[in-house]
Image: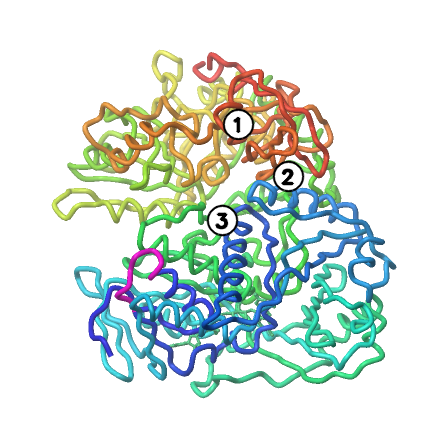
Amino acid sequence: MKTTTRAVVIGGGIAGCSTLYHLTQEGWSDVVLVERDELTSGTTWHSAAQVTNFGGNQTMVGLKTHSINLYKELRDDADYPVQYNHGDGGIRLANTEEQMDGYRHFSSMARGMGVDFEVIDAEECARRHPLISTDNLLGGLWDPSDGDIDPASLCQALARRARKAGAEVYRQTNVTGLTQHKDDTWTVHTNKGDIDCEVVVNACGYRVNEVGEMMGVHHPVASMEHQYFVTDEIPGIVEAGHRMPLLRCPISDYYCRQEKNGLLLGFYEQDCKTWGMDGISPDFSNDLCPDDLDRVTDVLEGAFERMPALMEVGIKNIVNGPITYTIDGAPLVGPIPNKRNAFCIIGLRAGLGEGGGHGWMLAQQIVHGEACYDTWCIDPRRFTGHTNVELTSLKAIEDYQNEFRFHFPNEHRPVGRDAKTTPITPVLAAEGAEFTIVNGWERVEFMKPTPDFHVTHTFKFDESFDIVGEEVAAVQNAVGICEVNGFNRFEITGEDRHTFIDRMFCGNMTKKDGRVGLGYMLNDHGMIKGEATIANLPATDRGPQRAWFGSAAAAEYHDMDWLQTHLRDDEDVQIKSLTNDQTILVIAGPKARDVLSAVSRLDWSSSAFPWLSARECFIGYAPATVLGVSFSGELAYEIHIPNAHLYNAYKTLRKAGEAFGMEMFGAKAVDSMRMEKGFLHWKADILTEFDPFETGLDRFVKMEKEDFVGKAALEKRVAAGKTVELVTMELDTKEAAAHGGSSVMVGGDVIGTVTSGDWGYRTGKNLAYAFVKPEYSATGTTFEVDVLGKRVPATIIPMGPYDPDYSLMRG
Ligand SMILES: Cc1cc2nc3c(=O)[nH]c(=O)nc-3n(C[C@H](O)[C@H](O)[C@H](O)COP(=O)(O)OP(=O)(O)OC[C@H]3O[C@@H](n4cnc5c(N)ncnc54)[C@H](O)[C@@H]3O)c2cc1C
């Protein structure tokens, strides 16, 4: 066994084998995999091993396409062919129009990744799957490339190829401890000896937290018991003369694929069970949980009604095994939060279908620092600090129970709500707030007109449309107040803070006390890594001279990692998170200055406190820090208040606001207004797949700066020319907004992809942003956008159609 290597991958299931193989493909051949037992002895060996192309966003579709292409290649390898039934096809069923709309959207989204789904009616479903009845069925989504693979030979094939490329695999090698050294390298302790390495990868399946504990980390991953059975031969399958497509049923929560001449039927029962939460026996290997078909009778009834042939055949065998879930159903693939040189590929609940792609995404991140697709949807840093065992188990149960029921854009599931609140959350609830959830924070979405007001889960504009319009009107005509909780805020202190900030951002960031600036951070490939405001505050009795770094609510761990990684040993810079300590109340609208003047003694005139200023003050007797910035396009102030004083400041502002017609507004109104101003959202419109020029952020880049992170790579990109451009479009429909991922079409060709869409109430326009090919980016260009299966005419308009010269927000 080697005693030094570049990377040690811990775990020999599909996650570990795929990572090991892809590390060799990305250029690291001095890598090893250690497995406590035999390869695939965790969950992988007993998997139903269906491989599908369906995903809720383009990254998932792209990485699953990679799995499929890789598995085809392995199937066709003459030396070691893997059994892969590719192209049986698959149907996701639907019995509501809302579900069908979802499928239409996912189909539009996948087309941009070169994947052709088809939305078909009930009769066509039955024609393609002759065993199903059309009762209570509207139709479904057809995925032509669905199939299934032999998990054991897949992993052996990947390990075999990795070995050929220089990697080594050590079986019967149990990792018993991990030590990180001062230079961030690791020693992996095993029952066979120690291995020193640069990078460790946790790919331990349901034992994820045993290894997590060895590095002092709890991963938000919980295991659920999951069962399937395999039937005896079904005559209808033999008679059909072709393999049966896969089925996924959100109506009755089961899946089904052909196994020999019978069916394999898997269940997501409501009466489900977590597994191994109080520890797992060290002897549980190549093992199963006891079967318990009583638990799945509700699901079985639905399956029998859909496929009556099932009632005629016996059950050959039953499998019940642990399957891992996370907080939001997507796995954790990438850097482990707050650790250096430590990565994970865990929480895979569809690891056979996705594993090929996840290993590819992870290996790229380890070797190149970034993958070819934006990996935020699987980034382990997307949850911050509230995801303990309790919450993870509850969310895992909720997710399991809803396995095939995709999230609607306006759907916020009930479990784990109240995880992050502020002192005014109950006050806002009592006033009628409907909450959305942002990284665990309960944020007002809109104000309900009546306590029992309810919206339909839909991809179309919903019943809150006019209510949101009224909130926008209040902001536009008078003044609105909005709580922005969880906003990420770091306090950066130390003599070298400006030099550090200057290096991290590609633009010129203000160094003046009392001034605020917006900037962008790039990665080493010249692509956009982060967006933040910097506000410089003078030394006062509240603290020394300092810069406040403000960014998206979900960005806390991500941005902290990025900043800390770039800190130099000899730099006098300290970074402290204030995210959980302070909350923002935004007041926006032409009367915002009047309200602020009524509650604070200072001079808030535009000459004393111009746009992009920052200063400390009191709101009544609540200490506050005010920033003159606007996301709505109206005159606005961000009032940052310590949570201890939030209730008091809120009451004071509301009382003063009465004289000026102040109304509450929520996140939906904010989103509508920011689109009218051409403002972007991190991880919707700002992605690591594009550089700042492609994203239309030219004014925030100063190439003449001596240096900044990503400059050399950006210079090369500029020389090569843009591959896409972000544009604003007006859509000719009042039925629905274009959702992120919708395809922009010219004839049969996809020439772009929507990143965000929303109705603009002040402009009366249905607006969307999209990255399109540069030759289609001129203002006035027309094309079509596939919105829920309809080709909607769209025209490029100048970015930020509301108040284009920014006179309102400058006040
Ligand atoms: C009943 C069932 C049906 C399923 N059907 C499908 C399906 O149809 N399609 C699909 O895509 N997915 C399916 N899945 C999910 C899929 O099987 C899993 O997502 C996948 O197998 C997880 O692989 P993994 O490599 O992450 O974990 P595992 O396969 O559990 O591998 C982890 C490995 O780490 C090793 N290990 C743990 N601790 C240590 C240590 N300290 N030192 C060294 N090694 C260690 C373990 O021994 C194990 O071999 C199903 C799961 C179940 C339970």
| Image: 257 above or below 360 | below
Give the residue at x 15% y 37%. 495
| Residue furthest bottom in the image | 283
User: For this rendering, which residue is in front, 209 or 464?
Assistant: 209
Label 2: element kind: helix
For label 1, the crowd category at 10 Å Cα-Cα, with few meaning under 14, some 14 to 19 and many 20 or more, is: many
Q: Tell me the quarter of the picture where residue 517 sits.
A: top left
Marks 1 and 2, Cα distance to the nearest angstrom? 25 Å
* Amino acid at the residue labelled 1: Arg
Marks 1 and 3, Cα distance to the nearest angstrom? 20 Å
Q: Residue 512 location, x and y as percent?
A: 24, 24
Residue pointed to by mark 2: 431
Residue 28: within the magenta? Answer: yes
- Which of the image's four quarters has the N terminus? bottom left
Label 3: element kind: loop
Q: Can residue 542 be seen in this view?
A: no
Residue 439: image tag: 3
Residue pointed to by mark 1: 674
